[in-house]
Image (spheres, rainbow, N blue to C red):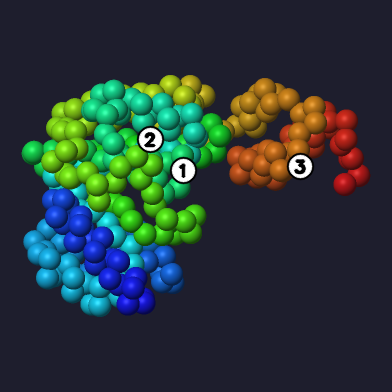
């Protein structure tokens, strides 16, 4: 870290402190470790950062030289983290958050369209979140209320995009904590419930949902837990999967599934099913 960068980093953190935020030194993305770019490495960082005065904050620049990113400690500061990669859904959830919680000028972007919205609370509470949803487009989506005992990176370089985190409207360097819209545990819980409903309505499925579907499917088929399905049952299920011209990857997945269900007998069904395709070569 150059002297100029060190001075800039100290000034940034001191400005945040004067605006009533609690800055957190966060490992820079240049360090070869899984935590790089997003997590603090200081021992007891939460307690240290909560109590840090200006002298302590200035000391970090040399004492934590690899921590070139800067986080913000949550507690009285609340972060609504919309971790959604579909742009339309991210915009909808951002609008929903502002409608339900208040229009905050402090919105942070690291990897768009994901976005984080900053609020404040007079009564700190623990994190609230939706489950992790697997969406129809193959992405994973989750919405979290970052609260007591957590932090989020506000300044520095994003480890994936290699570009700076940015605040399109106003950042905590310009907006004091007291000027952020206030929220409560109850209002945040209501927002998370609404976000949960929205993501489910748009195809999101959690691991628990998947287990429930599988359990109901086995129950409907008359199977007990861990009981293998019969040849006839698998044959009936396979008849519902058309094979007019499937890509190779999908064709091979069906074969693997048949083998997993029936063992060597699955090959009989696979060959019969494969013969439905015009491009099938029985000699292969």
* Residue at the (24%, 28%) spot, across then down: 102
Q: Residue 208 got which mark?
A: 2
Image quadrant of residue 45? Answer: bottom left
* Residue at the (8%, 61%) spot, across then down: 51
Residue 32 position, x and y percent, is: 44, 72
Give above or below for 198 relative to 64. Answer: above
Task: Report the mark closest to the observer, 1 or 2.
Answer: 1
- Neighbour tally class for label 3: few under 14, some 14-19, many 20 plus, Cα within 10 Å: few
* Residue at the (33%, 56%) spot, across then down: 155
- Neighbour tally class for label 1: few under 14, some 14-19, many 20 plus, Cα within 10 Å: some
Residue 244 position, x and y percent, is: 80, 27
Nearest to N terminus: mark 2 or mark 3: 2
Under tag 1, what secondary structure?
Answer: loop
Q: Quick check: 237 left or right of 283? A: left
Marks 2/3: CA distance? Answer: 30 Å
Nearest to N terminus: mark 1 or mark 3: 1
Q: Nearer the viewer, residue 84 or 55?
A: 55
Q: Quick check: 211 left or right of 248? A: left
Image quadrant of residue 279? Answer: top right
Q: Residue 112 got which mark?
A: 1
- Neighbour tally class for label 2: few under 14, some 14-19, many 20 plus, Cα within 10 Å: few
**Residue designated by label 3:** 248
Q: Residue 195 got which mark?
A: none
Residue 193 position, x and y percent, is: 28, 26
Q: Nearer the viewer, residue 18 or 115?
A: 18
């Amino acid at each position: 870290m150059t002297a100029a960068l060190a001075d800039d980093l100290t000034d940034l953190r001191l400005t945040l402190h004067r605006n009533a935020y609690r800055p957190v030194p966060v490992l820079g993305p240049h360090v070869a470790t899984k935590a790089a770019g997003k997590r603090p490495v200081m021992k007891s960082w939460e307690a240290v950062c909560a109590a840090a005065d200006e002298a302590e904050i200035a000391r970090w620049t040399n004492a934590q030289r690899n921590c070139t990113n800067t986080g913000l400690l949550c507690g009285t500061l609340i972060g609504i983290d919309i971790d959604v990669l579909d742009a339309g859904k991210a915009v909808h959830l951002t609008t929903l958050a502002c409608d339900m919680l208040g229009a905050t000028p402090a919105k942070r972007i690291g990897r768009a369209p994901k976005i984080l919205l900053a609020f404040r609370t007079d009564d700190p509470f623990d994190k609230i979140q939706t489950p992790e949803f697997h969406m129809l487009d193959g992405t994973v989506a989750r919405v979290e209320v970052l609260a007591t005992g957590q932090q989020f990176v506000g300044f520095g370089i994003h480890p994936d995009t290699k570009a700076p985190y940015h605040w399109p409207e106003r950042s905590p360097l310009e907006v004091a904590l007291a000027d952020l819209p206030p929220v409560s545990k109850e209002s945040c819980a209501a927002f998370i419930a609404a976000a949960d409903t929205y993501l489910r309505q748009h195809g999101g499925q959690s691991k628990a949902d998947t287990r429930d579907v599988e359990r109901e499917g086995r129950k409907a088929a008359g199977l007990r837990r861990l009981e293998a399905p019969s040849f006839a049952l698998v044959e009936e299920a396979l008849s519902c999967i058309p094979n007019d011209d499937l890509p190779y990857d999908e064709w091979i997945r069906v074969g693997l599934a048949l083998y997993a269900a029936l063992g060597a007998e699955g090959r009989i069904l696979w060959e019969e099913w494969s013969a439905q395709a015009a491009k099938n070569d029985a000699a292969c």
